Image: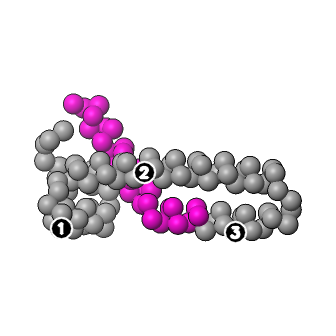
């Protein structure tokens, strides 16, 4: 998978122009090829899925075990945590990177 990835190829796999520009900016800044950046995004996506899963389990356990007085606080904290994970880890961008790498692996 050391081949050169082009902007048109990324566009064919669902990346938007803005996302490709962001990838290009980070690629130029860090002198990393697109494939390295996509692999990092894929790892972040998996970490985000794990965090969201753990937070969901914690939320369900909290709802089942606590009194109703604590429910509002637990829901508020959960909303803040879900929002922070979704915005700090670009889940949609990571999903596209994971999908792209999976498709490229199947072709090779």
Residue 23 percent coordinates (x, y): 25, 62
**Nearer to us in this view, 9 or 80:** 80
Q: Which of 85 and 16 is in front in this view?
A: 85
- Find residue 21 and name its label: none
Q: Name the residue under label 1.
A: 29
Badge 2, how many Cα within 10 Å: few under 14, some, many 20+?
Answer: many
Give the mark nearer the N terminus: 2 vs 1.
Answer: 1
Q: Residue 93 lies in magenta, yes or no? A: yes
Residue 76 tag number: 3
Q: Is mark 3 on a helix, strand or loop?
A: helix
At a point 31% along the width and 38% down the height, the residue shown is 103
- Residue 12, can we see it? yes
Question: Is residue 104 positioned above or below 92 on the image?
Answer: above
Q: What element carries label 2?
A: helix
Q: In this view, does 76 lie to the left or right of 102?
A: right
Q: Mark 2 points at which residue?
A: 45
Question: Where, quadrant-wise, is the N terminus in this rendering?
Answer: top left
Q: Give how far apart the Cα atoms at labels 2 and 1 are.
A: 22 Å
Rendered residue at 48%/53% (across/down)? 48
Q: In the picture, residue 30 is in which quadrant?
A: bottom left
Q: Which is nearer the eye, 74 or 97? A: 74
Q: Which colour scheme is used?
A: one colour
Residue 13 is at least partly visible in this image = no
For marks 2 and 3 on the same chain, the one whose residue lies earlier in the sequence: 2
Q: Is residue 107 left or right of residue 58?
A: left
N-term mark: 1 or 3 = 1
Separation of disc 2 and disc 3 at Cα? 24 Å
Segment tinted magenta in the rendering: 81-108
Identity of the residue drawn at 23% across and 50% down = 36
Image location of residue 13, percent across then percent down: 31, 49
């Amino acid at each position: 998978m050391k081949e050169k990835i082009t902007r048109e190829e990324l566009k064919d796999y669902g990346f938007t122009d803005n996302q490709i520009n962001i990838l290009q900016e980070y690629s130029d800044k860090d002198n990393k090829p697109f494939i390295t950046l996509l692999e990092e995004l894929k790892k972040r996506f998996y970490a985000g899925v794990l965090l969201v899963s753990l937070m969901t389990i914690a939320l369900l356990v909290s709802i089942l075990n606590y009194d109703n007085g604590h429910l509002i606080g637990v829901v508020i904290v959960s909303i803040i945590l879900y929002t922070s994970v979704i915005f700090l880890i670009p889940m949609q961008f990571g999903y596209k990177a994971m999908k792209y790498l999976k498709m490229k692996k199947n072709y090779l």
